[in-house]
Image (cartoon, rainbow, N blue to C red):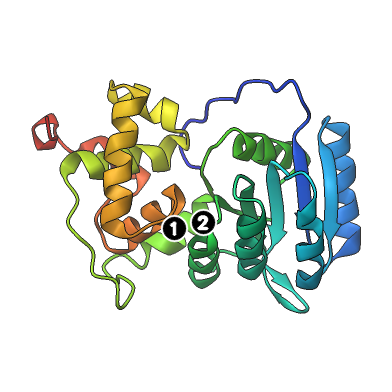
Amino acid sequence: MSGSVVQPAARKRPIRVLLVDDHRLTAEMIRVVLDRAGMEVVGMAYRLADVGPMLTGAPAHVALVDSGMPDGRGSQAIREIRRGWPTCRCVLLTGYADPDIAEEAIGAGADGVMLKDIGVDELVDIVRHAAAGHVLLAESVLASLVERTGDPPRHRPLKPLTDRERTVLEVLLTVGDTEVAASRLGITESTYRVHLHHAMRKLGAEGRLQAISLALRAGLIRPPDALFHRSAGDQDP
């Protein structure tokens, strides 16, 4: 996410991770990195067809999914993972900021879309933040989505959002975490979640990142550099 990020609290049990990547060497290198960080790689799928059989055991906390495979797309893997492991946080890793790839993955249930041009430490941080419930969006991916502002998806009429509903999405886009976003706005987390639920329902979104993506494309919220330019008088009570 762009903006400040609060480090997630330490876990007592290791974070369980599923890797979906058709490049075996890349997957093995990621496994070594995560092992050294104290995480547990519970499975490595090299094809879309390998994903289903891995979903019979205890669910992973996080799935890192490559955007493309020989027999399918990352979005297809994410959709299958979310069906089998509804609590698993899915992060798409892609080689470039393509808004079509990002929107397809987000629509499938991705909790994050990040680029592969990252270092070891950043990869570990991505897994930790995903496991902690953050939404994650690479800045260049965000920029590609912002370029589509004013071009809402077809066949999806959107209901207008209140100022407060727009604000909760904008702040979430900046900080990535619901608890931190509520604190930034000076409201309780339960109140924040009520506004967030209303916004998601109006947008027809099944997840927080999808709500952000739809609202950005429809021009209903502003990207982070314009976040707090709105005057206090524009806020709903």
Examine the image and state in which quarter residue 9 appears: top right
Give the x, y percent position of residue 99: 49, 68
The numbered disc on residue 43 is none
Q: Residue at x 67, y 34 (%)?
A: 128
> 4 left or right of 45?
left
Res 133 visible: yes
The picture places residue 74, in percent across and down from the top left corner, at 66, 67
Q: Provide the secondary structure element on which disc 1 rests.
A: helix
Which one is in front, 114 or 52?
Answer: 52
Count of picture labels? 2
Mark-to-mark CA distance, 1 and 2: 5 Å
Query: Outermost residue toward the left?
Result: 233
Left or right relative to 185: residue 52: right
Q: Residue at x 84, y 52 (%)?
A: 43
The C terminus, quarter of image = top left
Residue 140 got which mark? 2
**Label 2: how many residues lie within 10 Å, few (<14), some (14-19) or many (20+)?**
some
Q: Is residue 30 visible?
A: no
Q: Nearer the viewer, residue 164 or 217?
A: 164
> Is disc 2 placed on a helix, strand or loop?
helix
Q: Position of residue 52 (x, y in %)?
A: 76, 64
Q: Is residue 189 above or below residue 143?
A: above
Direction from residue 25 to residue 124 in the image, left or right: left
Residue neighbourhood size for the residue with mark 1, other residues' Cα within 10 Å, grouped as few (<14), some (14–19), many (≥20): some
| Badge 1 vs badge 2, beta-carbon distance below 8 Å | yes
User: Who's the residue at 33% across and 57% down the image?
Assistant: 216
Q: Residue at x 81, y 57 (%)?
A: 54
**Residue 196: image x %, image y %?**
32, 41
Label 1 sits on residue: 143
The residue type indicated by label 2 comes to Ser
Vertical comparison of 190 with 74: above or below: above
